[in-house]
Amino acid sequence: MPTATLNQIETHYRDEGDPNGAPVLFINSLGTTLHLWDPILPHLPDGLRIIRYDMRGHGETEVPPAPYSMGTLVKDAEALLEHFNVKDALVVGLSIGGMVTQGLAVKRLDLVRAIVLSNTAAKIGSPKMWEERIDALRTRGLPAMSDDIMMRWFSRDFQTRPELSHWKAMLESTPAEGYAGCCAAIQGTDFYTPTSGLRLPTLGIAGSEDGATPPDLVRETVELIPGARMELLRRTGHLPCVENPETYAALLTDFMKETGHV
């Protein structure tokens, strides 16, 4: 289990593929680990350098006391790329990972050459909503909340598939402190102004049945960036890399070719 001390915490990561290949950094969503991306990896082009990590408070990464700030999460991603001496990465972020991606691109454009904003937004929900989520977590625990979260995460089709139990278990195993810490980071984030200043190749991806970041919310953020385009996956929820990995990987591959990353 490779780890590195980054931004004062032990961070679990995977650095796979061609060490000299075009780098792609994947940033996971709230309540998932770096294994969120497992379904798409077999469908990506050969020769890439694929870097993944468990976000602060998730998976095998250290769990500092909540709350966390978005600035801290951005600094974690920045420190990981610097640890590997990687520049000009394609950064793919989903949900909170997409918020981190926006913040990283704003702060360190020297590290980022293109971004994919998947099922995310410049601002997600309201401070009151996140406060209620944190309160529910503290009083009820994640397992008691997981059925409702699965409804927001996955399409009606996927709700009946046996694989749902794997992702539900991943959510329920998330440390409560880490989940609460990242909820607080989302609660305090409004990137509309900084994201509107970005000028780099951008692909937005949304799922038509996403109950967490609906397509219109994703589109509103993607359209802040001149020249960005958006793809909508039908009959798909909040985690399209899980529900529709071949199509999702094809979108990433096409974007890499368009931007000269491969």
Image: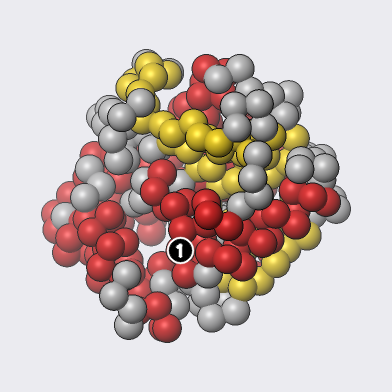
Label 1 crowd bin: few (<14), some (14–19), many (20+), radius 10 Å: many
Q: Is residue 153 above or below residue 7?
A: below
- Residue in front for this viewpoint, 257 or 193: 257
How far from the left and from the top, in percent, is residue 6? Answer: 42, 19
Q: Is residue 58 above or below residue 79?
A: below
How far from the left and from the top, in percent, is residue 203? Answer: 72, 54
**Which residue is painted at 16% across and 55% down in the image?**
141
**Which residue is painted at 52% across and 51% down in the image?**
41
Q: Is residue 229 above or below residue 177?
A: below
**Which residue is painted at 74% across and 48% down in the image?**
256
Q: Is residue 161 above or below residue 181?
A: below
Q: Tell me, yes or no, if residue 244 can be seen here.
A: yes
Tag 1: residue type?
Val
How far from the left and from the top, in percent, is residue 136? Answer: 22, 57
Look at the numbered disc 1 and give the secondary structure of its residue: helix
> Which quadrant does the C terminus fall into?
top right
Q: Tell me, yes or no, if residue 220 can be seen here.
A: no
Q: Which residue is mark 1?
A: 242
| Residue 99 shown left or right of residue 9 in the figure | right
Residue at the far right: name it: 227
- Residue in front for this viewpoint, 145 or 130: 145
**Which residue is painted at 50% across and 35% down in the image?**
16
> Which quadrant does the N terminus fall into?
top left
Where residue 206 sits, quadrant-wise, is bottom right
- Residue in front for this viewpoint, 239 or 253: 253
